[in-house]
Amino acid sequence: MTVLAVRGLNLFYDGRQILHQVDLTVEPGEFLVIIGPNGTGKTSLLKAAAGLVKAEGEIEILGKPLSGYGRRELAQQLAVVPQQPPLDFPFTVAETVLMGRAPYLGLLELEKVRDLELARRAMEFTGIDHLAERRLDELSGGERQRVLIARAVCQEPRLILLDEPTASLDPAHQVKIMDLMEKLRRESGVTVIMVSHDLNLAAMYGRRLLLLTGGRVGADGSPAEVLTVSRLEASYGCRMVVEQGDGSGPLRVFPRPGLRG
């Protein structure tokens, strides 16, 4: 069953059209990375898919219209990982991760043994179990991001949406976060959709890329199909270089300087 289907999606904000007739279908177990210049609608598309903003068109999650889901039912199928949690979030790592079980609990219902066990496993999976009693405001950016992913894992969703999960992280933490998402996809069969500005990370991890240009789908396919010089230059408005090292590794993308000294 298709995990996410978007048809004819239009999104307006303050009288300006952000997304134009976007069509997208995502199958189980895919790792899709949404790329494109600033202001082209990447985060807006993610928010629309999660039901966080209202848009025109059709959106289906696991064959059911998004409008047919209640908040708790949707949260049992879909988890959203934002860029960063607020630093004034007054909870420990363990408490934050356990919040992933909220969609399965009734009003004022306490967590059961299974909920606690799932939270423990999620912390182990993301390598933060040793931080369980630490507060979020005591952690580094990379550690906080792994906490958010652990909370999403604890939620047991079929689909995870991530908005720039590696933003502002150093290269080592970027790779750790991306490795976690690939591990989750491979071991649990979770479908991953991620927004990223980093074209090289997208090329390394995305099995499929969606290039948005001016709120429209500019290309949709494998990294080799999407990351072409002509497409990237037209989308980003600067000269680009696309290389593949020895011919078998991931593509490498970088802008070409317009001026040379």
Image (cartoon, helix red, strand yellow):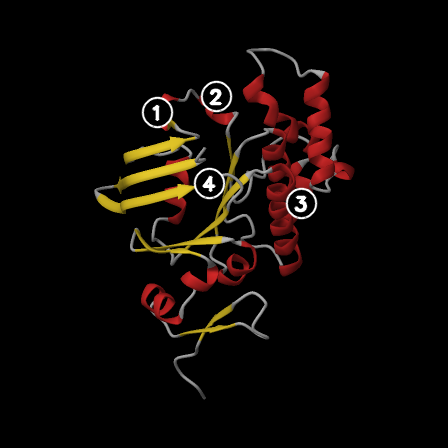
- Name the residue at 52% across, 25% down: 76
Q: Is residue 213 left or right of residue 87?
A: left
Q: Looking at the picture, how far across and down is residue 27, in whole percent?
A: 46, 40
**Within 10 angstroms of label 2, few (less than 14), some, or many (20 or more) residues?**
few
Q: Position of residue 160 (x, y in %)?
A: 52, 38
Q: Quadrant of residue 218?
A: bottom left
Which image quadrant is residue 230 in? bottom left
Q: Considering the numbered disc 3 on the image, is that residue within a helix, a strand or a loop?
A: helix
- Amino acid type shown at disc 1: Ser
Tag 3–tag 2 contact (CB < 8 Å): no
- Name the residue at the left extreme: 15
**Which residue: 52% across, 45% down?**
83
Residue located at (67% from left, 45% from top): 143
Task: Tell me how far mark 2 sits from mark 1, CA to CA.
Answer: 11 Å
At label 3, counting other C-alpha atoms closer than 10 Å, the crowd grade (few under 14, some 14-19, many 20 or more) is some
From the image, state whether disc 1 or disc 3 is nearer to you.
Answer: 1
Query: Which circle, 4 or 3, is nearer the viewer?
Result: 4
Secondary structure found at label 2: helix
Read off the residue under disc 4: 27
Residue underneath mark 1? 67
Dot 1, crowdedness within 10 Å: few (<14), some or many (≥20)? Answer: few
75 horizontally vs 96: left or right: left
| Alpha carbon separation for disc pair 4 and 3 | 30 Å
Distance from the alpha carbon under mark 4 to that under mark 1: 20 Å
Which residue is disc 2 drawn over? 73
Mark 3, residue position: 143
Mark 2: amino acid: Glu
As drawn, 146 above or below 257 = above
Q: CA distance from mark 3 to mark 2?
A: 29 Å
